[in-house]
Amino acid sequence: MTNQAWLISTAIQQAVQQLTNSANDCNPKLEAEILLCHSLRVNRAYLLTWPEKALTETQVAEFFALVERRQAGEPIAYLLGYKEFWGLALQVSPATLIPRADTETLIEIALQKLAQYPKPQILDMGTGSGAIALALASERPDAKITAIDASPAALAVAQANGLAHQLKINWLLSDWFSQLEGQKFDCIVSNPPYIEQQDLHLTQGDLRFEPDSALSSGSDGLDDLRLIICQAPSYLNQQAWLFVEHGYNQADAVKQLFRQAGFQSITCQVDLAGHPRVSYGQTP
């Protein structure tokens, strides 16, 4: 790659060709530009303004190393080291799930229901990168938010994101409710693992690189949802809310779990693609 003079334009053309020939479902030109911007520490306007600018050997080597990793399927978010969620640039790593736009549906509904609660006490379960907790904290600075995860590596990433955005969260290492004895909340939110263990999607696309512990949960994908929904009432105040994200085909099963746990006003909200994605209910 470094035996010839590379211009911004020719480097992008070569990268587009490599990414087009990969098996990834992607926009080759957009991804090539994003990766080159990351390598050069510039924005996309710079690429458009200086297409004939020559690159150094170091810049070329760094750029095509990223292109080759993307060609092999590694997620863009891991290559860049961050992902934007709810307007926040969040650090991510292979220890965390990559935040997805569909989860913003959960944020929107939770904020609507919490509007009538002054200084709400909120629990985010399985926080990962801290995306949900930090999004809620950015909108409700008056809230007292606790965010838990069973992974020390994931919790370290979440804590770093909290510091970067100067948002105050009580970060806690906990295997679901294990370290929360005696605590009560006005709202519990969670995007837990919910993919079936044998689902072929786990061997495809970005999911191949994300932590399995944050993705799959038992033969039907409901093991963690069962635990959360069943135990949540013991940690919720009266007329408090539980919000969970789940698979597009799990809405009926999740609704039944809410009923069995004694929740009222049980509702399911669709995501950006129109799929059932977030279910929620209120304690009596």
Image: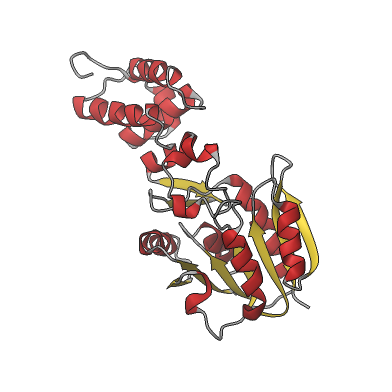
How many numbered markers are drawn?
Answer: 0
Is 264 in front, or is 86? 264
Judged from this view, the residue extending furthest toward the bottom is 182
Q: How far across and how far down the image is residue 260, in percent?
A: 75, 69
> Which image quarter holds the N terminus?
top left
Q: Give me the residue at 62% from left, 52% from top.
A: 104
Is 252 in front, or is 144? 252
Q: Quadrant of residue 243?
A: bottom right
Q: How far across and how far down the image is residue 144, in percent?
A: 56, 76
Q: Image height check: is 143 above or below 85?
A: below
Q: Image height check: is 125 above or below 185?
A: above
Can residue 112 be seen in this snapshot?
no
Q: How far across and how far down the image is residue 161, in percent?
A: 42, 59
Q: How far across and how far down the image is residue 139, in percent?
A: 61, 63
Q: Give me the residue at 77% from left, 67% from top.
A: 259
> Which image quarter holds the C terminus?
bottom right
Is 222 in front, or is 51? 222
Is 43 in front, or is 143? 143
Can residue 53 be seen in this snapshot?
yes
Q: Quadrant of residue 174?
A: bottom left
Please give left or right for residue 15 compared with residue 62 in the image: right
Judged from this view, the residue extending furthest toward the left is 3
The image's colouring method is secondary structure
Q: Image height check: is 186 above or below 61?
A: below
Q: Give me the residue at 46% from left, 54% from top.
A: 213
